[in-house]
Image: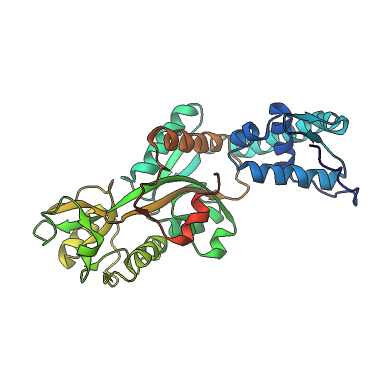
């Protein structure tokens, strides 16, 4: 079934290159689902972009039926112009980005998800330089992303302040299973798995007071709400694993963590259950970012998510309601 031709409007003064790129990929694939997969966006978002371009140009570019997608005469005419415009933009941007590395924040050296994505991206783009950085939290990295001092980071996108989110974009990567780090002589340490109800009455450290990990503390607050679990007050800000371990050994509070959390002396790591709390992790970047290695980073995140089932949620998995929409943007 075809759609009506867009009504002619005022001649556009500017065309967003993103719309031209969406048009070209659909023109090459002649299939919206395949084109959306190539662009790492939802099919609905791609359809909106094409319709917007049609409105701005005042003409129909595709004939859509239930069986096929074909270019109109105006669509055929646009293809070479769009290709030349995007090639020129790519050449311009490459002249300013080719010489510098893509700066990828892993939060901290042992962050397994982020590190795995970075390593796969290096395999996918061996001729590009992808450099690791360590900002110890997505909130801390967000300001650096917006300032252009970082290119990408990882973490819970829904936990960022709306003012930060407005200048950023993200791609869901993984639901990390959450855990608790306990002193080895803690009453719950003998358990193989710790039910959330067993933490009632406990005071658990989750980074309160650390301005770089606000999104993590907010996740803990939502998880603990109504369960009788207290959030530990701010501790001295520790920089580096050695200092963090020293402070935690001193205050002896259980520590909210994920299953990939690195070992700490005189402690045990236990998964949380009933329900299974999940920490939503996205790849996050500055809106409009263009870099020769960036596509490889996004592709690496998708490949690993699919290979390892990182975005499959267990039937008894828990995430905050605030995170549901963000983690389902590509479904």
Residue 254: percent from the left, percent from the top? Answer: 21, 62
**At 68% across and 27% down in the image, what residue appears?**
29
Q: In which quarter of the image is the N terminus?
A: top right
Residue 307, by quadrant, is top left
**At 51% across and 49% down in the image, what residue appears?**
328
Q: In this view, does 267 lie to the left or right of 294?
A: left
Residue 240, by quadrant, is bottom left
Residue 211: percent from the left, percent from the top? Answer: 40, 66
Relative to 155, residue 124 above or below = above
Relative to 10, residue 76 above or below = above
Q: Number of labelled discs? A: 0
Residue 176: percent from the left, percent from the top? Answer: 35, 48
Residue 152: percent from the left, percent from the top? Answer: 50, 47
**At 22% across and 58% down in the image, what residue appears?**
195
Q: In which quarter of the image is the C terminus?
A: top right
In front of the other: 131 or 309: 309
In front of the other: 301 or 199: 199
Relative to 224, residue 80 above or below = above
């Amino acid at each position: 079934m075809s759609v009506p031709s867009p009504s002619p409007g005022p001649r556009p003064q500017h065309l967003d290159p993103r719309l031209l790129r969406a048009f070209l990929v659909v023109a090459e694939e002649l299939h919206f689902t395949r084109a959306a997969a190539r662009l790492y966006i939802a099919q609905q978002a791609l359809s909106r972009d094409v319709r917007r371009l049609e409105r701005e140009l005042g003409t129909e570019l595709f004939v859509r039926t239930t069986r096929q997608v074909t270019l109109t005469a105006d669509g055929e005419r646009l293809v070479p112009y769009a290709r030349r415009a995007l090639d020129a933009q790519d050449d311009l941007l490459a002249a300013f980005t080719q010489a510098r590395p893509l700066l990828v924040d892993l939060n901290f050296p042992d962050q397994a998800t982020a590190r795995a994505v970075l390593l796969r991206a290096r395999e996918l783009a061996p001729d590009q330089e992808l450099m690791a950085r360590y900002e110890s939290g997505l909130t801390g990295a967000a300001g650096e992303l917006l300032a252009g001092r970082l290119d990408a980071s990882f973490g819970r996108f829904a936990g960022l302040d709306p003012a930060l989110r407005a200048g950023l974009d993200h791609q869901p990567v993984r639901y990390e299973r959450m855990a608790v780090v306990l002193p080895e002589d803690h009453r719950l340490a003998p358990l193989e798995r710790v039910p959330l109800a067993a933490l009632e009455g406990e005071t658990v450290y989750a980074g309160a007071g650390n301005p770089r990990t606000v999104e993590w503390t907010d996740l803990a607050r939502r998880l603990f709400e109504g369960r009788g679990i207290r959030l530990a007050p701010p501790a001295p800000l520790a920089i580096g694993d050695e200092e963090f371990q020293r402070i935690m050994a001193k205050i002896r509070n259980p520590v909210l963590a994920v299953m990939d959390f690195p070992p700490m002396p005189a402690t045990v790591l236990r998964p949380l259950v009933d329900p299974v709390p999940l920490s939503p992790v996205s790849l996050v970047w500055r809106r409009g970012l263009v870099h020769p290695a960036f596509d490889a980073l996004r592709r690496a995140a998708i490949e690993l998510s699919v290979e390892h089932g990182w975005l499959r949620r267990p039937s008894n998995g828990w995430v905050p309601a605030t995170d549901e929409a963000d983690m389902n943007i590509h479904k």
